[in-house]
């Protein structure tokens, strides 16, 4: 792991809300909505099982996105089992205390997922945890993921990725896709583009959220999804790609194996995201 477990645990222990604001930031709500739509839409195009599907969510954190995904997936098809795992015991404790009546099974695991040996799932989700691993660990993890797949398993993996020379803290798109290609076939790419200026303004606003007079108003603005969405549309329209934009890429994958009819159908469609554009 590139970041120590103690460091991750203390991030969760230090704050009473989610460390990344998944539970309150408007920009996170935009992101969650895109993930949920991508997953639900792809699952609708695949064969349904009456017995219910088994789902694994890797790097579930406080379980906020996980719970939303569970609700949306189970509205479209029966879910027999939903296992959510994280390397951080603090994240799992937070998830359990935030969702005490959840039907999701929250569990702490080691970073190579060795604890899941022998288990298989119909759907594997992994949102924004890949950058926590170095390249070698990631490749070992992808091999492990293969062993958790059934022939028709769909995987949804996302990460913030760098656009051109900007955002070097994130993974390079080509590197991530190159690593993944060894074990999985990519059925679809979906990008969320976010203006760099939305991030800048959000960060500035976050610093002011404890202001004695305007703090309440600023926090209210920060929780709104429509405000960053509108701001993003305006800056994108004005800049027409000249101004830097951050990219978050979601890949819909399956193991290298003979394709079923529904998989071929799914692979034929690539999409445009709201507030974004389709990937090459
Ligand atoms: C940025 S949070 C994302 C949480 C959630 N998926 C979301 O998108 O809201 C990343 C989480 O992944 C966990 N994580 C990192 N590497 C992991 C691994 N190899 N296996 C399981 N969890 C991991 C971290 O502990 C952290 O809680």
Image: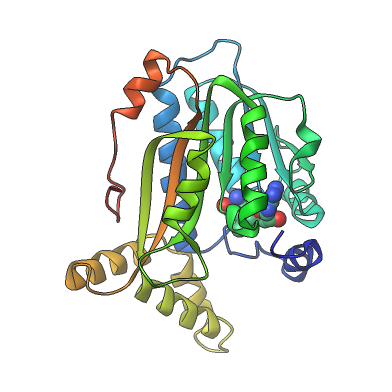
Instruction: Decide which of 138, 239 is in the foreground and name it.
Output: 138
Q: What percent of the width, then of the height, locates residue 189?
A: 37, 43
Horizontal side, residue 186 vs residue 230: left or right: right
Q: Residue furthest top?
A: 50
Query: In the image, is residue 117 above or below residue 260?
Result: below
Query: Is residue 61 something that shows in the picture?
Result: no
Q: What percent of the width, then of the height, locates residue 114?
A: 78, 38
Q: Residue at x 78, y 66 (%)?
A: 13
Task: Name the colour scheme.
Answer: rainbow
Q: Residue at x 18, y 72 (%)?
A: 238
Q: Which of the 4 image quarters holds residue 140?
A: top right
Instruction: Decide which of 274, 113 is in the foreground and name it.
Output: 113
Horizontal side, residue 237 vs residue 58: left or right: left
Instruction: Decide which of 241, 136 is in the foreground and name it.
Output: 136
Instruction: Decide which of 262, 179 is in the foreground and name it.
Output: 179
Horizontal side, residue 258 vs residue 124: left or right: left
Q: Residue furthest bottom?
A: 212
Q: Which residue is drawn at 67% across and 28% down?
A: 147
Q: What percent of the width, then of the height, locates residue 40?
A: 44, 32
Quadrant location of the N terminus in the rendered image: bottom right
Query: Is residue 116 something that shows in the picture?
Result: yes
Horizontal side, residue 118 vs residue 195: left or right: right
Q: Which residue is drawn at 80% across and 57% down?
A: 90
Q: What percent of the width, then of the height, locates residue 24?
A: 55, 62
Query: In the image, is residue 97 above or below residue 214?
Result: above
């Amino acid at each position: 792991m590139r970041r120590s477990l103690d460091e991750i645990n203390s991030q969760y222990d230090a704050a009473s809300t989610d460390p990344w604001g998944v539970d309150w930031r408007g920009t996170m709500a935009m992101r969650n909505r895109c993930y949920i739509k991508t997953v639900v839409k792809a699952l609708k195009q695949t064969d349904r099982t009456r017995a219910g599907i088994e789902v694994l969510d890797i790097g579930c954190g406080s379980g906020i996105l996980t719970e939303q995904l569970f609700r949306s997936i189970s509205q479209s098809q029966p879910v027999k089992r939903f296992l959510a795992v994280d390397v951080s015991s603090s994240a799992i404790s937070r998830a359990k205390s935030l969702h005490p009546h959840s039907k999701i099974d929250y569990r702490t695991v080691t970073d190579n997922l060795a604890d899941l040996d022998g288990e298989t799932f119909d759907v594997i989700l992994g949102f924004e945890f890949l950058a926590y691993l170095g390249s070698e660990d990631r490749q070992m993890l992808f091999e492990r993921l293969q062993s958790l797949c059934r022939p028709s398993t769909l995987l949804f993996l996302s990460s913030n990725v760098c656009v051109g020379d900007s955002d070097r803290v994130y993974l390079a798109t080509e590197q991530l896709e190159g690593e993944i290609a060894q074990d999985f076939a990519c059925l679809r790419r979906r990008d969320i583009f976010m203006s760099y200026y939305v991030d800048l303004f959000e960060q500035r606003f976050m610093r002011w959220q404890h202001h004695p007079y305007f703090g309440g108003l600023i926090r209210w603005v920060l929780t709104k999804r429509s405000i960053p969405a509108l701001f993003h549309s305006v800056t994108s329209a004005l800049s027409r790609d000249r101004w830097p934009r951050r990219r978050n890429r979601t890949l819909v994958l399956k193991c290298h194996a003979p394709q079923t009819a529904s998989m071929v159908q799914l692979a034929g469609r690539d999409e445009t995201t709201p507030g974004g554009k389709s990937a090459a």
